[in-house]
């Protein structure tokens, strides 16, 4: 097995890392890299928009799209290098690039591709995911937000919840019910792109325990959405949703961010003394850091396997679920370890006493998000039990 990159791959990857590292130098101080940070302040949001424009300018958002849609026709591995470079340098991803574009390329009409893909490639539009509802999370087919066709529009009523970045997004990609009597219930769902400025949409913050605002409830009150925005056929939205779930599954962006945290912690332990000794000489700390290094290395190998499988024609549910579980668990381990190493100082925020600008204090309160978002780890384990181990399917 040969894991070496070609000379061209290596050159482009290096360039992506250099550009993102340069952009990362200008990140606002409060932007730690926690998932919700980019939406938190106007400054953070403007900074991320600036980064996306710079990345778009180089043609990297569309690097793996076919040439006829403005891409470079390269393999998926190049997009993964970009995810890695952005993740390591704390530049957030946008759902347009990661989810909407691959969904359009697979399920969109020619008209839809030519209309929406250029907006995504230019870094000009920002997207949110309108899937979950108060009674539809793990059981997503339970969606009740209702759309009734009236002429060339769907009139949509209902509530979405947990909408990450809904207060900043220009567009949303939504699953909604078009047939309330369908059995099984996933057969009555459709998938549509929604302009978030449409009259009748109300976005309301879901406050977090760390007082940040990344997530929202989104209410639909007689919202008119053009039926030309429907992706796939009416009542066939489940297929599109599943396709969208499969879009970016390597997890390499998250792992790259965690690699940065490990590098930061190692540096901190080398530079900080307690009881007359450097922290890096403490056998327990060394042990714990080494464990995380092992976990990260194994997970990165699995990520690269996922990309290889995707390029070879489709990623298995086992690999995608396994990387989701592992990356979220490493995320928790490293956030907890950072706080343990720093002791009481780890809990101090916005002070000259808070080590490393409070990154680990912040992550301590945010890290569990990944274990829930995009399908909880319990659900991922169920999938593995069923798909990989052949255990009975749980509904
Ligand atoms: C940080 C964050 C960001 C999110 N962003 C978005 C977003 O942008 N857009 C969006 O649409 N949604 C978003 N979500 C919602 C997310 O997809 C749901 O929270 C998730 O699917 C779980 O659904 P739920 O919250 O309704 O929990 P439930 O489905 O009610 O689950 C509650 C608990 O029961 C467990 N459970 C449920 N069913 C089973 C089962 N069959 N077997 C074993 N255990 C089970 C779950 O694992 C969980 O621990 C986000 C969530 C989080 C936490």
Image (tube, rainbow, N blue to C red):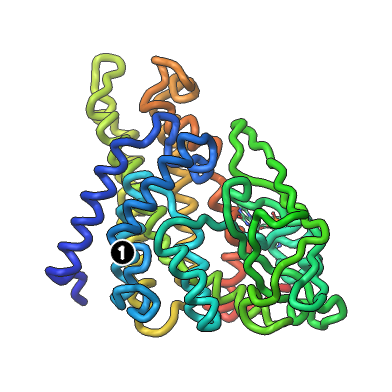
Q: Is residue 227 above or below residue 78?
A: below
Residue at the image position 45 percent from the left and 57 percent from the top:
326
Where's residue 56, x and y in %? 35, 58
**The residue at label 1 has a CB less than 8 Å from ligand 1:** no
Q: Is residue 17 left or right of residue 246?
A: left
Residue farthest toward the front in the current orientation of the protein: 151
**55 or 395, which lies in front?**
55
Residue at image point 43% right, 68% down: 118
Dot 1 surroundings within 10 Å: few (below 14), some, or many (20 or more)?
A: some
Quarter of the figure with the C terminus: bottom right
> Label 1: which residue?
59
> Residue 120's spot in the image, x, y percent?
45, 63
* Residue 253 visible in the displayed image: yes
Indicate the position of residue 16 as horizontal and vertical percent values. Answer: 25, 56
Q: Is residue 309 visible?
A: no
Figure quadrant of the N terminus: bottom left
Q: Of 251 and 388, which appears nearest the observer?
A: 251
Q: Would residue 377 appear left or right of 350 to someone viewing this image?
A: right
Residue 187 position by quadrant: bottom right
SS of the residue under disc 1: loop
């Amino acid at each position: 097995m040969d894991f070496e990159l070609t000379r061209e791959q290596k050159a482009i990857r290096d360039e992506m890392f250099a550009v993102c590292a340069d952009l990362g130098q200008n990140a606002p101080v409060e932007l730690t890299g926690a998932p919700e940070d980019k939406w938190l302040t106007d400054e953070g949001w403007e900074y991320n928009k600036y980064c996306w424009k710079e990345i778009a300018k180089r043609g990297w958002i569309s690097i793996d799209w076919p040439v006829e849609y403005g891409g470079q026709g390269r393999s998926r591995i190049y997009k993964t290098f970009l995810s890695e470079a952005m993740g390591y340098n704390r530049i957030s991803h946008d759902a347009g690039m990661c989810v909407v574009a691959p969904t359009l390329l697979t399920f969109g009409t020619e008209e839809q591709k030519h209309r929406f893909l250029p907006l995504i490639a230019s870094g000009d539009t920002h997207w949110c995911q309108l899937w979950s509802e108060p009674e539809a999370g793990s059981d997503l087919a339970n969606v009740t937000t209702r759309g009734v066709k009236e002429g060339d529009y769907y009139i949509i009523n209902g509530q979405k919840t947990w909408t990450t970045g809904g207060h900043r997004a220009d567009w949303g990609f939504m699953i909604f019910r078009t047939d309330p009597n369908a059995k099984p219930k996933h057969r009555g769902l459709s998938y549509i792109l929604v302009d978030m400025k449409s009259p009748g949409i109300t976005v309301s913050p879901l406050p977090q325990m760390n007082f940040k605002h990344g997530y929202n409830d989104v209410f639909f009150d007689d919202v008119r959405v053009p039926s030309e925005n429907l992706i796939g056929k009416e009542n066939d939205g489940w297929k599109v949703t599943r396709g969208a779930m499969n879009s970016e599954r390597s997890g390499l962006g998250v792992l790259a961010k965690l690699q940065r945290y490990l590098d930061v912690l190692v540096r901190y332990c080398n530079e900080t003394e307690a009881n007359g000794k450097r922290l890096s000489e403490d056998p327990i700390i060394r042990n714990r850091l080494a464990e995380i290094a092992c976990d990260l290395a194994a997970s990165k190998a699995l990520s690269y396997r996922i990309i290889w499988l995707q390029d070879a024609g489709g990623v298995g549910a086992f690999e995608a679920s396994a990387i989701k579980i592992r990356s979220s668990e490493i995320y928790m381990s490293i956030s907890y370890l950072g706080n343990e190493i720093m002791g009481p100082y780890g809990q101090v925020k916005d002070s000259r006493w808070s080590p490393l600008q409070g990154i680990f204090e912040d992550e301590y309160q945010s890290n569990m998000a990944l274990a829930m978002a995009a399908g909880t780890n319990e659900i991922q384990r169920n999938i593995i039990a069923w798909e990989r181990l052949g255990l009975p399917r749980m509904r």
